[in-house]
């Protein structure tokens, strides 16, 4: 059926139809537990293409599932037929009217895109889910999303003013809030039929629906009541794409208040925070959010103390945001709230940047809670229950007891002012009895929340996770009402079948149980995933942060998605393809073409390892895939030419003048580049006429000797790039260290094996690293700091070396860990030295491009602190330079490499032609030299006492 369906879609004029197995794998899941493989993905350009899609779907009887950012947590955006992705083309803000304070948007418009335009006009779009950087307005309407500030601005449905809806039958219906019932009924017989259904169920609607703010489960039929004005527009909010397909929406905007103030309140536990939440409502808050200490602990462990500002004492916190136009009044309200809160300690956060950092911690909750307190994978499924706010504390205690009864744990957080709890739970889905245990827990949890007069869903929708449980909270009459609404608007059940009405079992189509463990013959230890590649790739819960532009806050992930806009080129898309490989159905084996297509444009930047709240590390997975694919087999040419670069560089350094002259021979060398798998448009950096080690020998630097350790001794790593291409960086580092009172000595000759690692030559990398770690071990064991200058090489010793040796255990693993603990960046060493003072850099404008591995593995925070102390005026860039080691040099990657550089780096250099570029990474400096007339300097050169 797929081939005929695809052919008919293309014949109907659809311009963007994806039927390849890589794309189907990438779209097989959303942010939920569920896996449904679509036959085809359609990305319409306009309403006409949407109408054509539905016409073909009717002809084939193919189900149609609407999808925005794919961040649906309950399985609302996956289906076995046609998945319609609106985020690719139907993603524009069509109009924004400041007079009416409204905007007309297409369904694939990302929330952040609308918000950016609204804020520029002095307005804002009120609802703001934690996924606001990548979720779409259409998806928000489908789920009736709320977000942190729903107390102040209401749910998405409350802010929906009008809609253009296409029914499964192809009828285009236009709605507007405030239209009289008579005019609505006159507009289409469809509405008249809906009115008759509501008329038969008035008593049920009045008694069972709309009981409290976060009752999102089921259809919002309370809006069809006569006293509600027969508001068909707001019925659509929360209908999860089951009643029609949204093609356009008009949304309310509100005036942005002049002042916002965050009050952070500490409590002894999360239930106590729940108890206190109703008190906050008396102070007219915009937001009252709850957060458990264990979520903060995960972030601190992963990113260090700089990732979380100082919080009040406590094991749980409420984040309360107050807003208004009078700063004095807002501050007075905050002071009174702090006194009345009953908190252990309160803190009023006036600094906007600090408040934004705290909010980011809360926003990353869905990802950070992807590992349970027992360090087990934690899952959605029962992550969105809501109860009346005054009953939240008691509900939390009973819910905690239920978790204990089932031997389950999770990390709670949520919209406590609305009574909404979010939590991911460590269901043992990988075990033989895990699915049954999951089902049993869902049933008992549904009964518990119903006993509190609550809702199965508070904003995520019921989807595949909870639709089956609706009889727990609704009477047979209410369920009959839902069924009549669904069958009236979608009589053939084409739209998102299995959701809300005639639901699929909550335990059907689960993704995790389909995947077997993959532990045998792995090269990496995957320490945090217990040596299981399947568990590692299933870290991806689909939160989709990799689809957002994170560069504005210094993030890196995911440069390839920002360059191409293709789901398969996002971290999530790649994870989904690898998950399909693990379950062995559509994608089979390490060498499957789908796997290599998805990984081809992965820059191995490691941005996801720090920026993805789930801690996924696609660079490591790519190296493992390449290792498994090519071990004992011929490799791509670039793996030999670039993957073994240090070997060729050492040979060339014996006669650098000759080699440099040879590399400058025009067209002949261009052809040679192609043979080596190198893009001919790439220049080859010249070898230095004298290596750093040769300079060091001539300037009194000796190699580390365990018998001659001194108090202020540091080992300086002469990596391949510093030694052979940028010896001036090593020379400057020596002068900086000596001026700081240290005695620098050199590491024994060796290599970190980075280029072997990135090309998946992991057996060779382990041998090379074994020698290097062995050469550094005595220094590390003696407590001598080991200072790395090239960030990628430093990161290998801090992270990859441990991963490569840990599985073997014994002395190699212990040595790798000892060395990793001793390795420092130059900034880490100097900022930890209370006796050292930086040079005066006041008045110096600096554009800083942190190396991706520096950002992801070591953190650039010490560098920022050092430069601040020095008085430099620093503009820190997010994103990747685009060269990313061998990636941007390889054939087939040049265009993407340049597009990545255009995300932040190149525009910044054009904006500030006189600024100094600080770039510690050799690849970053090489990219700049290749694409501009500028050149970058290393931190050591900036701090060099002989700098002119």
Image (cartoon, rainbow, N blue to C red):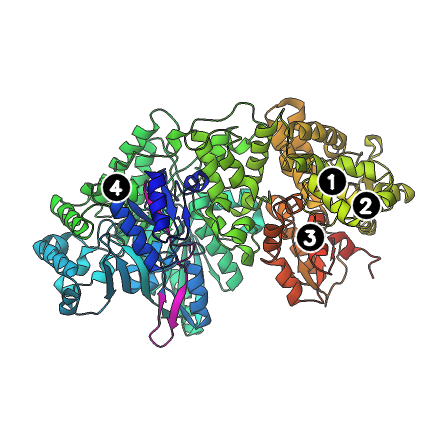
Q: Nearer the viewer, residue 83 or 691?
A: 83
Left or right, 599 with respect to 362, comes to right
Q: Which residue is mark 2?
A: 687
CA distance separating discs 3 and 4: 50 Å
CA distance separating discs 2 and 4: 63 Å
Mark 4: secondary structure: loop
Q: Quadrant of residue 281?
A: bottom left
Please provide the residue range marked out in magenta.
Answer: 80-104
Q: Nearer the viewer, mark 3 or mark 1?
A: 3
Left or right, 68 with respect to 310, comes to left
Q: Looking at the image, can residue 614 be seen?
A: no
Mark nearer the N terminus (2 vs 4): 4
Name above or below for residue 597 compared with residue 276: above
CA distance separating discs 3 and 1: 31 Å
Disc 1 crowd rating (10 Å Cα; few below 14, some 14-19, many 20+) is: many
Q: Which residue is mark 4?
A: 498
Mark 3: secondary structure: helix
Q: Quadrant of residue 848?
A: bottom right
């Amino acid at each position: 059926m797929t081939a005929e369906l695809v052919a008919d879609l293309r014949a109907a004029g659809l311009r963007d139809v994806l039927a390849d197995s890589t794309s189907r794998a990438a779209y097989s899941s959303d942010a939920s537990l569920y896996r449904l493989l679509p036959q085809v993905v359609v990305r319409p350009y306009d309403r006409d293409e949407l109408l054509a899609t539905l016409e073909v779907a009717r002809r084939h009887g193919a189900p149609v599932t609407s999808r925005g950012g794919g961040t649906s947590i309950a399985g609302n955006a996956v289906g076995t037929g046609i998945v319609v992705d609106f985020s690719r083309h139907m993603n524009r803000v069509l109009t924004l009217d400041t007079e009416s304070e409204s905007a007309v948007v297409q369904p694939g418009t990302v929330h952040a895109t609308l918000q950016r335009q609204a804020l520029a006009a002095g307005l804002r779009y009120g609802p703001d889910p934690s996924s606001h950087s990548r979720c779409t307005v259409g998806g928000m309407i489908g789920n009736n999303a709320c977000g942190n500030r729903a107390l102040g601005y209401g749910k998405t449905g409350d802010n929906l003013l009008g809609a253009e809806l296409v029914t499964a039958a192809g009828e285009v219906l236009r709605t507007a809030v405030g239209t009289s019932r008579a005019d609505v009924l006159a507009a289409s017989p469809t509405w008249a039929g809906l009115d008759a259904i509501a008329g038969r169920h008035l008593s049920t609607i009045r008694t069972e629906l709309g009981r409290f703010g976060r009752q999102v489960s089921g259809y919002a039929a309370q809006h069809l009541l006569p006293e509600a004005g027969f508001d068909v527009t707001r019925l659509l909010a929360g209908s999860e794409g089951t009643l029609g397909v949204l093609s356009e929406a008009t949304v309310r905007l509100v005036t942005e208040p002049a002042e916002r103030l965050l009050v952070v309140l500490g409590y002894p536990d999360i239930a106590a925070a729940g108890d206190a939440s109703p008190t906050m409502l008396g102070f007219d808050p915009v937001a009252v959010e709850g957060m458990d200490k264990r979520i903060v602990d995960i972030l601190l462990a992963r990113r260090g103390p700089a990732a979380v500002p100082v919080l009040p004492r406590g094991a749980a916190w409420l984040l309360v945001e107050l807003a208004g136009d009078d700063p004095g009044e807002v501050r007075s309200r905050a002071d009174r709230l702090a006194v009345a809160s009953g908190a252990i300690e309160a803190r009023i956060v006036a600094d906007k940047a600090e408040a934004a950092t705290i909010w980011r911690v809360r926003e990353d909750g869905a990802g950070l809670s992807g590992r349970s307190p027992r360090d087990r994978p934690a899952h959605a499924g029962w992550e969105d229950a809501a109860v009346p706010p005054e009953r939240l504390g008691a509900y939390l205690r009973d819910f905690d007891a239920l978790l204990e009864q089932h031997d389950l744990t999770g990390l709670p957080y949520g919209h406590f002012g609305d009574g909404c709890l979010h939590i991911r739970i460590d269901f043992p889905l990988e075990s033989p009895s895990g699915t049954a245990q999951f089902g049993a827990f869902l049933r008992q949890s549904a009964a518990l929340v119903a006993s509190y007069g609550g809702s199965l869903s508070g904003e995520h929708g019921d989807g595949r996770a909870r639709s089956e449980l609706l009889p727990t909270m609704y009477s047979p009459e209410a369920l009959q009402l839902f069924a009549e609404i669904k069958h009236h608007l979608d009589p053939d059940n084409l739209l998102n079948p299995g959701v809300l009405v005639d639901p699929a079992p909550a335990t059907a189509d689960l993704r995790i149980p389909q995947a077997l463990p993959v532990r045998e013959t792995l090269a990496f230890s995957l320490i945090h995933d217990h040596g299981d590649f399947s568990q590692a790739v299933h870290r991806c819960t689909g939160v989709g942060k990799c689809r957002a532009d994170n560069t504005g806050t210094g993030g890196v992930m995911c440069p390839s998605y920002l360059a191409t806009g293709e789901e398969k080129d996002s971290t999530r898309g790649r994870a989904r393809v690898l998950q399909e490989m693990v379950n062995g159905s559509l994608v089979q084996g390490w060498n499957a073409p789908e796997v290599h297509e998805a990984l081809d444009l992965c820059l191995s930047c490691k941005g996801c390892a720090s920026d993805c709240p789930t801690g996924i590390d696609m660079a490591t997975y790519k190296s493992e895939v390449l290792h498994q694919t090519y071990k004992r087999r011929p490799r791509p040419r670039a793996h030999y030419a670039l993957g073994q670069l240090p070997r060729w560089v050492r040979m060339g350094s014996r006669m650098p003048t000759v080699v440099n002259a040879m590399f400058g021979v025009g067209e002949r060398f261009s052809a040679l580049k192609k043979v080596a798998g190198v893009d001919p448009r790439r220049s080859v950096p010249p070898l230095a006429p004298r290596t750093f080690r040769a300079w060091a020998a001539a300037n009194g630097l000796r190699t580390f000797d365990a018998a001659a350790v001194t108090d202020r001794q540091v080992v300086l790593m002469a990596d391949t790039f510093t030694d052979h291409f940028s010896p001036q960086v090593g020379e400057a580092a020596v002068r900086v260290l000596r001026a700081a009172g240290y005695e620098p000595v050199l590491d024994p000759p060796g290599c970190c094996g980075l280029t072997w690692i990135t090309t998946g030559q992991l057996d060779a990398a382990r041998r090379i690293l074994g020698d290097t770690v062995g050469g550094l071990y005595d220094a590390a064991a003696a407590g001598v700091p080991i200072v790395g200058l090239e960030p990628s090489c430093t990161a290998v010793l801090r992270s990859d070396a441990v991963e490569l040796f840990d599985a073997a255990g014994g002395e190699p693993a212990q040595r790798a860990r000892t060395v990793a603990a001793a390795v420092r960046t130059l900034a880490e060493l100097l900022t930890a030295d209370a006796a050292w003072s930086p040079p005066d850099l006041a008045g110096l404008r600096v554009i800083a491009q942190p190396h991706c591995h520096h950002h992801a593995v070591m953190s650039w925070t010490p560098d920022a602190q050092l430069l601040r102390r020095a008085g430099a005026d620093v503009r820190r860039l997010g994103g990747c330079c685009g060269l990313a080691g061998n990636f941007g040099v390889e054939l087939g990657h040049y265009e993407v490499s340049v597009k990545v550089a255009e995300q932040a780096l190149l525009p910044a250099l054009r904006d500030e032609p006189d600024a100094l570029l600080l770039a510690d990474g050799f690849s970053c400096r090489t990219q700049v030299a290749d694409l501009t007339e500028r050149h970058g300097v290393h931190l050591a050169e900036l701090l060099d006492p002989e700098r002119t």
